[in-house]
Image (tube, grey):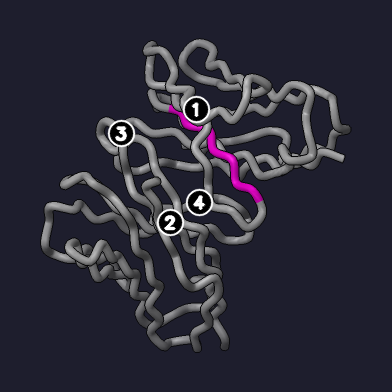
Amino acid sequence: GAGVSQSPSNKVTEKGKDVELRCDPISGHTALYWYRQSLGQGLEFLIYFQGNSAPDKSGLPSDRFSAERTGGSVSTLTIQRTQQEDSAVYLCASNTKPLEQFFGPGTRLTVL
Amino acid sequence: AQTVTQSQPEMSVQEAETVTLSCTYDTSESDYYLFWYKQPPSRQMILVIRQEAYKQQNATENRFSVNFQKAAKSFSLKISDSQLGDAAMYFCARGYGGNNRKLIWGLGTSLAVNP
């Protein structure tokens, strides 16, 4: 079956604009994760969804960041009033068991 | 802060040779998982190998093996018979939280494979 897909592949926006990044997890995967990978930095956990449970938002860096997961499948990460420091690759991953995460190709966000 | 440290930002190896990538970590937990992920230029992270901390035997997956030293909090990755397709960024990560669902990551090691 298809792997995790993310769209867009690349996004260039102006400072202050809002952006939405989409993640389509592998069908049947109950858990979904968002990470941020900044240049020269490791991956930074942002948020985690598991089934119908309340999401773990402990990694969101500010209230400009939010995410939702509709119908237990597709997820959207929204960044409001983007700043230049938001420029990074945003990676999504999904799984059914906790010991292997399947990653998408990421969205490269550039804030001018 | 609990951290994962990869002390080698860049490494290179000749094709068919063996290379070892280093990783150390900090934790106060007794049971946890450790992971090595590979990220080729396509950006897609791929799990290479994982190790459960309470298992003394080092994990092995074909040409990939680990040297896990729990007391030293060290988790190195050995790649044998290196191939051109092994060229990538390699990230070490440690699981935490319930069921090790969340991961804390090192900064990565860029591996070049020379023909």
Q: Position of residue B83 (x, y in %)?
A: 47, 78
Contact between marks 4 and 2 (CB within 8 A): the answer is yes
Going by the numbered disc 4, the residue's amino acid type is Met
The image quadrant that residue A76 belongs to is top right
Going by the numbered disc 2, the residue's amino acid type is Tyr
Residue A43 magenta = no
In depth, the one of A58 and A50 nearer the eye is A58
| Residue assigned mark 4 | B45
Task: Relative to A70, say whether B86 is above or below.
Answer: below
Q: Distance from label 1 to label 3 (Cα)?
A: 13 Å
- Going from the N terminus, do you reach mark 3 or mark 2 first? 2
Report the residue at 27% width, 68% height from top: B66
Q: Position of residue B36 (x, y in %)?
A: 38, 58
| Residue assigned mark 3 | B97
Question: Is the same chain shared between marks 3 and 4?
Answer: yes
Q: Position of residue B41 (x, y in %)?
A: 63, 60
Q: Distance from label 1 to label 2 (Cα)?
A: 20 Å
In depth, the one of B33 and B49 nearer the eye is B33
| Residue assigned mark 1 | A47
Going by the numbered disc 1, the residue's amino acid type is Ile
Q: Chain of mark 2?
A: B
Q: Secondary structure at mark 1?
A: strand
In depth, the one of B16 and A106 nearer the eye is A106
